[in-house]
Amino acid sequence: MKSHLPLIVTFLLSICVATGCSSGTKQAVVETAPATYQPTPESPPADRLHSVAAPKLSEVEEAVKRVFKDVAVIHPDYKSSFLTGDFNGDLSQDLAVVLKPVPEKLADMNEEHPRWLLRDPRVPHNPREPLHVEKDEVLLAVIHGYGNNDWRDPEATQTFLLKNVVGSGMRVQNGTEFVKNFRSEKKPRPQGDLIGETLKGNEGYLYYNAATYSWYDPKTFKGEAETPGVFHGRSARR
């Protein structure tokens, strides 16, 4: 009998543990809530851009007002003063519009921390030598699209303000077609659509790559320098 006692005790203890008899009460069951699943936002389909309505002047004026308040206006001397395309390659439609500064607000345009990035695509950017907007200067603002309403969205305020790149015959050039059809050993790597134009007698292209806008002149282009860093703000698609 003694030889079987350990086996009997072990059997009884296992029953008590399974049924909760050791505490005299039912054992509480702790349920773990399932992890919350947050799907990754999907990029809008590429063909959606083909169905976006053509911009109206009133809409362009509203977008300029949203970003620049009253310090800049659409330039009145340019018949074709605005273009739309996916210039930064995020499948959202952007707006490029020719502007002129309001003379009385020039100091506001040159404030230390403006709501846009002022760049000259034809020269390397040097943070130690900040650029300034000059009186009566012709500028090109590129307002990046955001959300389903693209550049028309109230939150679409990510903007590059570009110097020395407004020429004649401005037009949108599809980036994919440009890379495929432009026969050159040295050509840029645009992330989206380009703006083709004649600037100071030379045909060239404005394009976005490495978080900034650059100028491509087929006659003088020597390749791209790697530019580290990204746009620091939010309002358009980030």
Image (tube, helix red, strand yellow):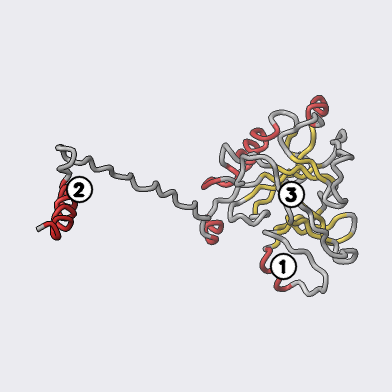
Q: Find disc 3 in the rendering and name its residue.
A: 229
Closer to the chain start, of discs 2 and 1, is: 2
Name the spot of residue 148 as percent of width and height, x first: 51, 47
Picture layout, residue 134 above or below residue 78: above
User: What residue sits 61% from the left and 43% below the top?
Assistant: 236
Distance between the alpha carbons at the discs numbered 2 and 1: 74 Å
Q: List the residue tagged with mark 1.
A: 178
| Numbered disc 3: secondary structure | loop
In the figure, is residue 57 to the left or right of 22? right
- Would residue 210 be found to the left or right of residue 8 on screen? right
Q: At x 67% / y 44%, what residue is drawn?
A: 143
What's the mark number on residue 199? none
Residue in the foreground of this view, choosing between 106 and 187: 187
In the image, what residue type sits under mark 3? Gly
Few, some or many C-alpha atoms within 10 Å of disc 3 (few <14, some 14-19, many ≥20)?
Answer: few
Tag shown at residue 17? 2
The residue that appears at 90% across and 55% down in the rendered structure is 200
Q: Position of residue 12 (x, y in %)?
A: 14, 51
